Amino acid sequence: MKDLEDMESDYLAPATERLRQERIAINKRSARLENVIQRKKAFAARLDNIIAEAEHERLAIENELASVLADRDAVSEDQ
C-alpha cells in the first residue's frame, strides 16, 4: 500500500507543484490589483474634491457677476 501511495505522490507531484506556483502567481496578481483599485479610488476621491472646489468657485464667480451687473443697473438708474 505504501508503494502505491508513493507512486501516486510521485505522479501527482508535478501537477501539485504547478498548482502551487499558479496559486502564488494569482495571489501576487491579486495584491497588485488591490493596489491598483486603491489608487483608483484615491484618484476618484481627489477628482471629486477638485470638481467640488471648481463648482464652488464657479458659483462664487456667478454671484460676483450678478453683483457687478446689479451695481451697473443701479448706476444707470441713478443717471
Image (cartoon, rainbow, N blue to C red):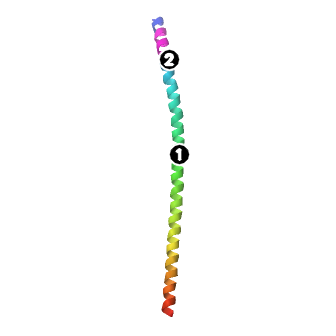
At a point 52% along the width and 89% down the height, the residue shown is: 75
Q: Position of residue 16 (x, y in %)?
A: 49, 20
> Tag 2's secondary structure?
helix
Question: Of circles 2 and 1, which is in front?
Answer: 2
- Residue 26 magenta: no
The quarter of the image holding the N terminus is top left
Query: Quarter-wise, where is residue 32 in the image?
Result: top right
At a point 51% along the width and 49% down the height, the residue shown is: 41
Q: Nearer the viewer, residue 20 or 70?
A: 70
Q: Which residue is mark 1?
A: 38
Q: Is residue 45 above or below residue 11?
A: below
Residue type pointed to by label 1: Gln
Label drawn at residue 27: none
Residue type pointed to by label 2: Pro
> Tag 1's secondary structure?
helix
- The part of the chain drawn in magenta is 5-12
Q: Position of residue 43 (x, y in %)?
A: 53, 51
Q: Position of residue 19 (x, y in %)?
A: 48, 23
Decide: few, some or many residues near mark 2? Use Cα within 10 Å; few <14, some 14-19, many ≥20.
few
Q: Which residue occupies the extreme bottom position in the image?
A: 79
Q: Which residue is mark 2?
A: 14
